[in-house]
Image (cartoon, rainbow, N blue to C red):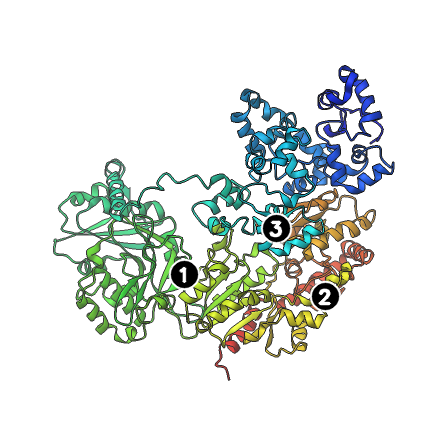
Amino acid sequence: MASDSVSQSMNEPLWAGFDAEWYRARYRHALGDLVDASAEELADHYVRVGKREKFSPNRFFDEAWYLQAHPDVAAAVEAGAFASGFDHYRSDGFINRSPHWLFSETAYLARYPDLTRATLDRLGVINGYDHYLRYGDREFRSGHLFFDPHLYYANALVSGPDSSSATTIPAAGPFTSFLSDEAQASRFKVSWYFDPEWYLNTYPEAAAAVNAGEMRSALHHFLTNTTPGVYNALEWFIEDYYLGLYPDIADAIAAGKLRSAYDHFVHYGTFERRKPHPDVDLNTYFFSGRVRSDIERGLVRDVFVHWLSRRHQRPLDADLDRPDLKMFEGLAVRKAENLIPLLVRRPLDFTVSGEAEVSVVLFARNRLPLTLSALSALRMTFPGALDVIVVDGGSQDDTTRLEHFVKGIRILRLDRSTTHAEALQAALPHLNASAVLWLGQGMRLSHGALQAALRELKGHSPVTKTQVGIVAGRVLRADGRIGEAGVLLGRDGTLTRYLEGADMSAPEACFRRDIACTTEAAFLIDRALLQQLAGFDAAFEASAMQIADLCLGAGEAGFRIVHEPAMIVSEDVHDGDATAITEADRRLLRQRHAATIRKAWPPASGLAARARSVLHPSAKRILFIEDQVPARSLGSGFVRSNDIVRTMAVLGHQVTVYPIYASTAPLPAIYADFPADVEVLHDRGFDTFEAFLQERSGAYDCVWIGRTHNIGRMMPVLMAQAAALPLEAIVLDTEAVTAPRTVLKANLFGEPLTQTLDEALEAELADAWLCRMIVAVNALDVRILRAAGYENVAELGHMCPVRPTPRKWGERRDMLFLGAIHEPNAPNHDSLIWFVDKVLPLLKDRLPEDVRFTVAGFRGASVDLSALGRDPRVELVGPVKDAAALYASHRIFVAPTRFAGGIPFKIHEAASYGLPVVASDLLCRQLDWRSGLEIVSGGDNDSQRFADQIVALYTDEDLWNTVRHGALRMLESENSPRAYSVRLNSILQEVLAPAR
């Protein structure tokens, strides 16, 4: 672009030209006699005078701010290298600099990763700002955190002096419309992060500057003043308070990396739920109401915006007391009654052709609507063949006409004195299927409930090989809260309904476990076992006690009774008589099952975490602590943690996952990532950790602490609750020894070292003395730890089953990187920037022109990959649900990591799919793989060598096949699930063995 021209061609960006009418209006007082001049005369004035006076040529470029924001440009203009900041921007500033105080080039490209260089080229635009003004603005994209197009439009419609003019905003674009009257940013909010009314009232000097025309609005003053630490953007953020609470950000502000504490908060702190104000607790707020759900659904950017925009919105029933359970039950009955006219016209049909999958026994006495409710739900949620037997205990209502509402069932008519035990006894000879569902009136199975129970009934414990005899579910009351999630059997014979009244999604209820018994009339039982036990024992008065007795008998016969959380059953009306347990029943239960009850836990609330499960003698309760819930999509060591949890469960242990930071991931994604028999306390965090240890004092046989920094953070709590811990069975899993990485990074970037390696190691491991065992991820870290004086060290790497994709060398193309980037300047982030900046240019003319570099994987909210997208050969695809397709289509994988600790899972995973890897020598050493045999080494921080090795692996089919097969052999021998299970079991056995 020519710097001495202000004309605009049809293909030039909107920001590149001279707008005479805008210039005339903006600088009317400075133009004098030229105020009515022609467009050509005004353009000439701008070139001769305006540039010198720091005038802007159009509304889209702010000359004064550009020079203030870019001191190096101001110096170049002062030195005569450029006539103006605008000339600099037109020359090359447009590549990566922001031209206006309310648009950020880097933030725009980072926020919308679809806007890669290749995309911009296809659209014929030269940078992000060009795209924004041509397309993004009218698409209601946001170019700056402090300009929300939706909020601006909504407020403009109701706040402007002529609100009808606001209707043109969608066609013109919110940002373009705003620039026609920037004073709007003083009249109403254009961002939730800034309150103009509060700001002008709080800072009279800002109001005076706006009134004098020195600043165009309150927002303009806030974003462009030269003392940002003096001004708060709104009432609910205090600069000094935030800095005092989080002093770690002061250095970044002093170094100019952050404009202010608020700059840190809106970009990073709000996602970490840091406190912006003494009266604002974002962490607590996040887990209240629908806040988390709203954020997950993308309704708001973060928890602070949610708090600002919706904290005053109260649920319609906020002032109402929660209705009594009886009211909910009454509504459930009314809904059930509505089935009668429907089923008269179209009866339910259970007609069986062939063999039934399940025999269903339902005992009914009057209450036809509840019978129909149970049968209707059963038919709607289970499409398979069902053999339904209804035992009618002398009903006198329309139950006598049940066959008019339901077809294909068998009805056994008994008299009114019939008990539950007699009803089941009568049905026993008629059962055809191998599985039997005992179902009470008004017990409605949810979608997939019976299928889940059937799958579990057919299962065997991989450890004990014992068969499942009975499956019970998560029973919900009519008000949607838990009625029972298994029963706690007390040593005195008492039966306590576990989690009664708790929220249905309570994580304690959402994992599969063996239990002593259930008392609810909704369970699946093996028919042979039911016949062996001869049904219910009529000696018990309460039906709940009959069910409990049946379960205990099954356990004593060598069968497992399982709580299956996916078997969700809603109870329309709770039968109080059925669960009213007499002392005589309790005494009889103690007599019948004395040996079992003697082994039960005393009925104390502090023992619930132990009493809720029946464990095999070899099974242990393990508390697994990590930074976050270790979802596999997070990468960065969390895959390894997930594999450890999975393998512990396979070994038969009961694992509780406790995150230091409560999870923000959707619950379906969390539960899909873990075995059903793992308890994932996704809603807990560091602030509830001490109370959790108190609540479960002595419950765990082993505590596994992931990542060294966590033991330091938790040490005060661990010491305060030492009596609650298995002090001889605490494991520190380092995941990666970070001290060598810190030293390597400092040397790489020429940063000063404040500690020697030995001093850094000593500080990193300062609290490791508490642990019975220290686990390292590779042999290199084991040697480092032992050299530091720790002998109690074991190695546990990654589990990575081989699953090579079949495509051959000639059927593949392009290069791939797939890895997680949680924060800026992390090893993966640094390596990608280095690779695109230093290595990719060296591949030009050495690889086919159409070879692309694909970057995939999890990206943290604060990570900006827009610099990578500027190269047209780079494709940014973000996180992927199934990486197999990427591994199957690409020819090579690159891992140019320059500093790191631990072991690179991304290489293991790529190699497991049969994709050969070029990696830095650092990663080759961590893996202990040989260059040219299992991997190809690109050296350390050597761009030329890395490029040479990429060319070699990409173009040499023989080398490609050698490396592919060598890596697969190595993984099969070292990282198979079986080898991993043996290694982890060995560690646990040593930790759990009595200390000598």
Residue at the image point whose x is 72% and y is 55% from the top: 831
Say which of marks 1 and 2 sits in front.
2
Q: Amino acid at mark 3?
A: Gly
Q: Position of residue 443 (x, y in %)?
A: 28, 51
- Kindly indicate the quadrant of the structure image that contains residue 631: bottom right
Circles 1 and 3: CB distance less than 8 Å?
no
Q: Position of residue 28 (x, y in %)?
A: 73, 21
Residue at the image point whose x is 59% and y is 22% from the top: 168
Q: Which residue is mark 2?
A: 754
**Mark 3 surroundings within 10 Å by alpha-carbon count, few (fewer than 14), some (14 through 19), many (20 or more):** some
Furthest toward the bottom, the residue is 996
Q: Is residue 402 left or right of residue 781?
A: left
Circles 2 and 3: CB distance less than 8 Å?
no
The secondary structure type at the circle numbered 2 is loop
User: Tag on residue 814?
Assistant: none
Q: Which residue is mark 1?
A: 512
Q: Of residues 459 and 197, which is closer to you in this image?
A: 197
Q: Of residues 536 and 855, which is closer to you in this image?
A: 855
> In the rendered view, would you say 264 is above or below 80?
below
Q: Amino acid at mark 1?
A: Arg
Furthest toward the right, the residue is 80
